[in-house]
Amino acid sequence: MNDTSKCQVDILIKNGLIVPATGPHNVITKGAIAINHGKIVELGPNHDICNKYIGEKEIDAKNKAVMPGLINAHCHFLQDFLKGSRDDLPLVDWIEQVSFPRIKLAVQDYLAGIHDLQKFATLHGCITNIKSGITTVLNMEWATPADTIKIYEDTGIRAIHTLTITDNHNWTPSEAILNDEQLFNLTDQLHEHCKASKEERVSLSYGLACPNSCTEGIFIKVRDLANKHQIPIHIHLAETEYEFNSFSKKHGKTPTRYLYDLGLLGPDVSAAHAIWLTDADIELLKKTGTSVVHNPECNMKIASGIAPIARMLKAGVNVALGTDSCAVNDNTDLFEAMRIFVMLQRVANLDSTIVSSYEALEMATIGGARSLGLEKKLGSLEPGKLADIILVDLKAANMRPVNNIINNLVYCANSGNVETVIVNGNLIMEKGTILTVNEEEALDEAEAYAQKRFQEAGLAVPSYYLTSLGEDF
Ligand SMILES: [Zn+2]
């Protein structure tokens, strides 16, 4: 077949080691993928695909793993600015001393019509996630103006923008709470902007902060709205022993049971953390089709506990993976999260066979897609699915030699090995350089603004800023 008889496609990736995440043994050692109009047209052995298709853009993936883009199912971009800032606080103290003051600032800025902090946080977060090979991210934020949605669009990432809802003034400071009218007006605006987003790459979910921070009324209202508008729900659930004990004392039931009894749980709900669960709670998650988002590094850093992920997987609960925020992690490296997940479950259960590297890969790809209701479109490399694909350098010293590609990706790789990122068939990072924004300028500008705004607001500025932006840096 000569070139003129070949079918032209937008992108042809060839010569790659393809890991489609459709099964632990489904690997194409020398393969190619044809991409057109944002979707995967066909993938298979190099010879077959290259004989059939010619790419307007051809990417030589020799010595690269070609895999689904990673899905970061729980993150907070505003806290990107707190990377490396704290090292010693338990969660409840951390929320009061670090998180609430900045949430208050975000809410008060929003009310005053000052939008830049959230917009710069979104820009910063998109860049750090793209660099890590994350093609879809769930970003949970407070009081984000509707024009924030354009930032995701411009950087090229796929995002589930999650507006945090909280109405319990006994738990959250009043200055950090939008009233019902403000909140649901903003939700409507964000929803409209998401629906109109380029290539429908940005969508909305309702973000309930946590069981303690919301009243029974708001849970019921959000459930009704979610049903009415077909908008998914995201929530922090059973993250601390404190939450578990306080619910048992106040309601005579676990936080999970409480949400189940209110009718909140369901297949459109993803719950971040889910550490403090009984066996009966795990059954409720399974029964309702609720997904769990595991954030092992955050849970370890602030010593919240070890989520019973192995038990959940055995029970058939869908589990996704998240990095959580850079204030409690402090990176967006989902490769590291895969590795840590496996090791933590094994040591917690004293069983080196309790979970596998492939289960970790599934959680970071198809499990993440399932947690967002997007498993038919994302999470694996299959014809007809959206072309969200990353290339990982197998020639990097830390990746060599490759003895088992799944194990190497989970145990050896880090986010710095990601070379190329494609979202919706658009090449947005090539050979380590983001093509949609000027990375260095954007990060400098975002950090300089955050430093200025935090100082103006009288917030303690971590010494990090003083050194990183000073003349000597
Ligand atoms: Zn969180």
Image: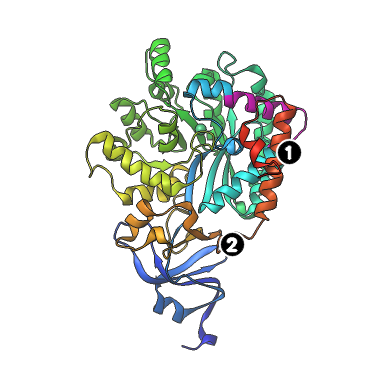
In the image, residue 40 sits, relative to residue 9, either above or below, namely: above
Q: Describe the element under mark 2 as helix, strand or loop.
A: strand
* Coordinates of residue 206 in the picture (x, y in percent): 56, 34
Q: Amino acid at mark 1?
A: Asp
Which of the two labelled residues, at mark 2 and mark 1, occupies the earlier sequence position? Answer: 1
* Coordinates of residue 320 in the picture (x, y in percent): 41, 42
- Residue ranking furthest to the right: 113
Residue under the image location 56 percent in, 20 percent down: 96
Any magenta on residue 112?
Answer: yes
Q: Main secondary structure of the magenta part?
A: helix
Q: Is residue 262 left or right of residue 228?
A: left
Q: Amino acid at mark 2?
A: Asn
- Residue ranking furthest to the top: 250
Q: Which residue position is annotated with label 1?
A: 116
* Coordinates of residue 467 in the picture (x, y in percent): 64, 38
- Callout 2 crowding tier (Cα within 10 Å): few <14, some 14–19, many ≥20: many
Residue under the image location 41 percent in, 27 percent down: 304
Any magenta on residue 341?
Answer: no
- Callout 1 crowding tier (Cα within 10 Å): few <14, some 14–19, many ≥20: some
Q: Describe the element under mark 1 as helix, strand or loop.
A: helix
Kindly identify which numbered label has been placed on residue 426.
2
- Res. 262 image quadrant: top left
- Res. 458 image quadrant: top right
Report whether the residue tagged 2 is closer than 8 Å to ligand 1.
Answer: no
Residue under the image location 64 percent in, 48 percent down: 152
- Res. 311 image quadrant: top left
Q: Is residue 182 left or right of residue 72?
A: right
Quadrant of the snapshot with the C terminus: top right
Work out whether residue 202 can be spotted. no
Magenta residues, start to end = 98-117
Mark 2 or 1: in front is: 1
